[in-house]
Image (spheres, helix red, strand yellow):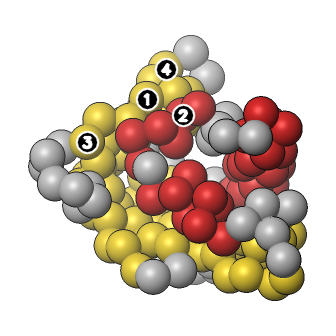
């Protein structure tokens, strides 16, 4: 069984701004390098179902997920995918000081094709860190603009 891979970082941004980025599912591709496309499927606000498009080699792979919102972030659970058996994630945020927020991202990925556990976990950890670093850069840019 593939374990839930977790990463955390502290970002120099206020909690409400961080949470607004996390829950803005439609704009995830703007700051999550592994995502190229998001389609909200249910027309609800906040969205409950989305189709996420990720680049896998030369192909664009799609995963449909159910989304659950909470006061400190959101979680998503795989509903449909051709390449994955499991794709479940949790974004969380909590204030850790004046204008500083700890952000956590946890992800469990199980591909349909057999792959060594250490390779899947290493790729998952790399994706988590890339997303957290990109979030940090996006929020720093927002802070510099003073928006």
Give the secondary structure at mark 4: strand
Quadrant where the C terminus is found in the figure: top right
Q: Marks 2 and 1: in contact by CB < 8 Å?
A: yes
Per the model, the C-alpha gap separating discs 1 and 3 is 10 Å
Residue at 66%, 71% (x, y): give it.
Answer: 15
The location of residue 112, given as percent across then percent down, is 44, 53
Question: In terms of image quadrants, where is residue 78?
Answer: bottom left
The residue pinned by badge 4 equals: 59
Assess disc 3: are there few (<14), some (14-19) or many (≥20) residues with their C-alpha within 10 Å of its C-alpha.
some
Residue at 64%, 61% (x, y): give it.
Answer: 18
Q: Earlier in the sequence, mark 1 or mark 2?
A: 2
Q: Earlier in the sequence, mark 2 or mark 3?
A: 2
Assess disc 4: are there few (<14), some (14-19) or many (≥20) residues with their C-alpha within 10 Å of its C-alpha.
few
Q: Which callout, 4 or 1, points to the residue nearer the camera?
A: 1
Per the model, the C-alpha gap separating discs 2 and 3 is 13 Å
Give the secondary structure at mark 1: strand
Question: In terms of image quadrants, where is residue 101?
Answer: bottom right
């Amino acid at each position: 069984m593939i374990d839930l891979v977790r990463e955390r970082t502290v970002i120099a941004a206020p909690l409400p701004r961080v949470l607004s980025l996390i829950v803005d599912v439609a704009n995830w591709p703007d700051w999550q390098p592994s995502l190229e496309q998001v389609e909200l499927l249910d027309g609800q606000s906040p969205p409950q179902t989305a189709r996420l498009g990720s680049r896998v080699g030369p192909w664009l792979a799609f995963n449909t997920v159910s989304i659950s919102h909470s006061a400190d972030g959101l979680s998503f659970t795989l509903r449909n995918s051709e390449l994955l058996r499991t794709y479940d994630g949790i974004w969380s945020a909590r204030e850790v000081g004046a204008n500083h927020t700890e952000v956590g991202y946890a992800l469990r990925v199980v591909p349909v094709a057999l792959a060594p556990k250490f390779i899947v976990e290493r790729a998952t950890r790399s994706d988590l860190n890339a997303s957290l670093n990109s979030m940090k850069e996006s929020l720093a840019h927002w802070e510099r603009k003073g928006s």
